[in-house]
Amino acid sequence: MLENVKKGFSAIKKISEKKNRIAFFVDGPNIIRKEFNVDLRAMRKKVEKYGRIVVGKVFLNQFASEKLIEAVTNEGLETIIALGDPEQKTDVDVAVAVHAMEAIYNPNIDIIALASRDADFFALIQKAKEKGKKTLLVAAKPGLAVSLKHAADFVEFL
């Protein structure tokens, strides 16, 4: 077991030494929740261990508070508000997938980092790996889809 931990740290060191270019996508409604007490700065720092964030987007629904939007902006991340039926909560998954696919096909991106717990993103991680990208999952343990955890090259917990 200790040998596996050493190998993991060695892989992280090797990855971060290359100063990889990272596209980082946050499934806001899934991760930025009161029960997880997420610190955006700490989350960003976990991702930056693997390289430099060149694309950073946090996806929120129409109910996001101005305070949250300001906090996202203060961390140097772009806020994307997914629009939908004003009477219902909007799901941001399609917006995340569209933006992430752009990054997967961008030759200037080395790592796709995703903050989510949602198994719906399993295919996205698989496609990123198929196209030669390394994948990083940033997640909270409660409710984390096991398939998503096992699909990613690297996993960081909040």
Image (tube, rainbow, N blue to C red):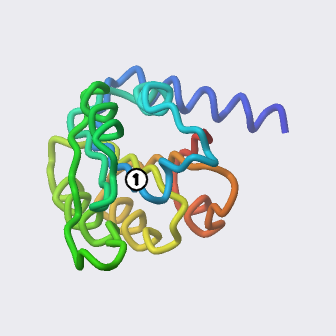
Amino acid tagged 1: Gly
Q: Tell me the residue that label 1 is attached to.
A: 28
Identify which residue is drawn at 32% across, 43% down. Answer: 24
Judge whether 61 appears above or below 66 on screen: below
Looking at the image, residue 6 sits to the left or right of residue 21; the answer is right
Residue furthest right as drawn: 1
Q: Quadrant of the N terminus?
A: top right
Judge whether 7 appears above or below 45 on screen: below
Judge whether 26 appears above or below 125 on screen: above
The residue closer to the viewer here, 144 or 66, is: 66
Q: Secondary structure at mark 1?
A: helix
The residue closer to the viewer here, 68 or 10, is: 68
Identify which residue is drawn at 79% across, 33% down. Answer: 3
The residue closer to the viewer here, 156 or 117, is: 117
Identify which residue is drawn at 32% across, 66% down. Answer: 92
Q: How many marks?
A: 1
Judge whether 68 appears above or below 89 on screen: above
Q: Quadrant of the C terminus?
A: top right
Identify which residue is drawn at 68% across, 52% down. Answer: 141
Q: Position of residue 67 (x, y in %)?
A: 33, 36
Q: Position of residue 53 (x, y in %)?
A: 28, 32
Residue furthest front as drawn: 87
Residue furthest top as drawn: 17
Q: Position of residue 152 (x, y in %)?
A: 51, 55
10 Å crowding of disc 1: few (<14), some (14-19), many (20+): many
Looking at the image, residue 105 sits to the left or right of residue 70; the answer is left
Quarter of the figure with residue 63: bottom left
Quarter of the figure with residue 55: top left
Q: Position of residue 113 (x, y in %)?
A: 39, 46
